[in-house]
Image (cartoon, rainbow, N blue to C red):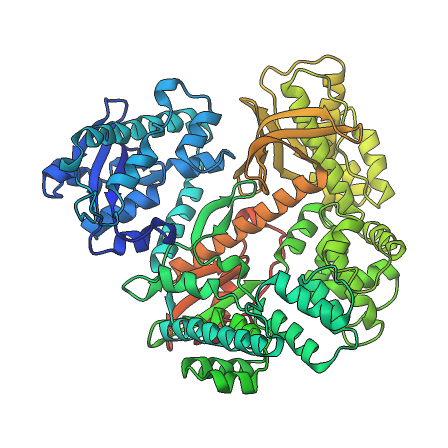
Amino acid sequence: MAPVATLGIDLETFSSNDIKYGVYKYVDAPDFEILLCGFAFDDEPVEVLDLTKTGGQFPQWFIDALYDDRILKTAFNANFEMTCFRKYFPDMPTECWECSSILALYNSLPTGLANVAQILKLGEDKQKDARGKALINYFSKPCKPSLINGGRTRYYPKDAPDKWATYIEYNRQDVVVERAIRHKLLRYKPSETEHKYWLLDQWINGNGARINQTLVNNAISMSSEYKARLTEEARRLTGLPNPNSVIQLKGWVEKRLKRPLRGLAKQDIADLLATPLDETTARVLRIRQLLGKTSVQKYKAMQEAVTSDGRVHGMFQFYGAMRTGRWAGRIVQLHNLPRNNMESEELDSARNLVLANDLDGLELCFENVPDTLSQLVRTAIIPADGSRFLVQDFSAIEARVISWLSHEEWRREVFAKNGDIYCASASSMFKVPVEKHGINGHLRAKGKIAELALGYQGSIGALKAMGADRMGLKDEELQDIVKKWRASSPHIPQLWANVEACAFNAVLQLRGAKSGYRPCTLDADPKLAVVVERLSHVRPETIGRYKDLIHNAGLDDKKHLIIGALANLRRVAQLNMGFKEEHPRPWFLPGSPSIGFQCQDDRLLVKLPSGRLLIYLHPLIERNRFDRDALTYEGLEQTTRKWGRLETYGGKLVENITQACARDSLAAAMLRLKEAGYRILMHVHDEVIMERPEGEGSLEEVKKLMCMNEPWEEGLIKNSDGFEGYYYMKD
């Protein structure tokens, strides 16, 4: 049902809990309250409700609007407003909310109201009020009591009426800016399916993950005590007042060794310990190593973020990876938790020792205490009483997706038979049978790093990043691996080229230039090239008349590929002859008519099989530092977090498309799991962690639901694996 009105909202609030631990912790504070509520229906003037004048009470007509599913509620970071309102109105429905921050992320814009308004070049009257930060610090956060402020712990409107009046105007302006952003971006609004995924995300964040607070608190205190023990031992052995000082310790070691040292970085210490050393020096250096591993930041994040229900909420950012739409981690950062490498019996034993706060026992049984505590971080996450975890993880989903997109059939056959892709890849590369722990098993490692590093046009540098140097592989061997891998999977390099060509042609068409890039397929079957050549003059819409020709060539299964190639080849010819398209059509990826490239409104749009769009802003074809044509666009640089012009290429575009398809598969699977009654608490990369009462649900059902294909996934071969347990771990 179409909404009868849109209600834009922005809140200003107070809480003694720091917002850096998420809105759920923020709202959980006993003193949390809504101070101001700016709002506007449709394009009407913005009004502000001052809740400090009404005892925190909202007018009934406003409450009615919050509950009315005919009224669409919007906010820039709607999760904040929704969570705040649900503290006041716990049963408030959320289905009729939309988030304009997600709208911005979908359009490949950054987070932050001010940033988005600036990049969109909204008028001066639609920019965020720069006075906001100071006003938030004044009215929305506690203050330290002092003689100057009269012992206050917070400031009220009566303490600074002029500032409060400014705060009201600041609140009003945020609604103006949010509305302007929304109007500007509505043409490229996420689909109804994406809205369902966003609501799913709100549900998962609201569920939260239960924390074993005894384990967390003990791990922090044991780490602190262990660090103190090591420091005292180092002080006794060295006689240094501060053995944690790099300068002091370096001087002490140099004196012992009677030679200068390069430094005491991690690798420097490892190199020194590999040489003959006296017992005291070796012990001091090992202490230095251990002290370098005593971080308990993940435990501290859990400790600080846990709410009164014993859970951490809000750990996932919907569309956090703007280029692909994948989720990003927040607060505890579940996406980069340390792995646990211990066997399950060892893990249980170590965990029980920490729960008992037995540092001596932990040190006796597990010599490396910091590493042990690090491996136990995941296990601090536990299910509700009477429930257990069901954990299921997609197997090699990106490798499966790229094989599906590229039509690399031998790889698809491996996946269909649940084979080992690393062995199969090595076998294809080196033309010998390869079995894990069997014949030519030593080649599997080369197949593995090739699979992990080379799928997105990586080369020697990518192999080194995956640990090729640590395997003892030389540059000549690495070049040979790159060559053999690309030769063994020729459809994947062709996919890079075709994706780049389609993107280039879409941008050239936008800029009014002649198209010069020919996306086509170089299939290993020479019969295909003959058919394409014979049909190159045929209108794509009449290709069906030539089905006999395709059939006689034995290429019925590749009809879609032929049509895609011909359509694009014909359009290249038309454009190069000066043909003008009044309404430019998408360039379709040969072999995948569901992936299209089109430019509109100075945006490069890549339509995925799911129907979702990947958006690249202000695309250009420019000469790069290698003096070749390159696609550039405006975006957020990942390392500097600055907005600027970025360069991409075929392999990188394929990476974006592949990861985006994998994300869509995960989102669809999680929605199916929710509808089947599984309570999802977390999802880490391609893994889903669910909580289910004892005796309900099963791994078999979960696997079936995970691997089920949506209509747009036809032909994608999926598999998953999982386990049940009473704490989270990496199985």
The answer to which quarter of the image holds residue 395 is bottom right
Please name the residue shown 70% across and 40% down the image: 591
Quadrant of the image containing the C terminus = bottom right
Expressed as whole percent of the image width and height from the top left, the position of residue 684 reads 51, 59
Expressed as whole percent of the image width and height from the top left, the position of residue 685 reads 54, 57
Numbered marks: total: 0
Nearest the camera: 159 or 254?
Answer: 254
Task: Tell me, yes or no, if residue 677 can be seen here.
Answer: no
Nearest the camera: 703 or 364?
Answer: 364
Expressed as whole percent of the image width and height from the top left, the position of residue 544 reads 69, 33
423 sits left or right of 29 in the view: right
The answer to which quarter of the image holds residue 339 is bottom right
Expressed as whole percent of the image width and height from the top left, the position of residue 573 reads 76, 20
Nearest the camera: 711 or 547?
Answer: 711
Nearest the camera: 691 or 598?
Answer: 691
310 sits left or right of 359 in the view: left
219 shown above or below 11: below
The answer to which quarter of the image holds residue 551 is top right
Quadrant of the image containing the N terminus = top left
520 shown above or below 208: above
Task: Tell me, yes or no, if residue 202 can be seen here.
Answer: yes
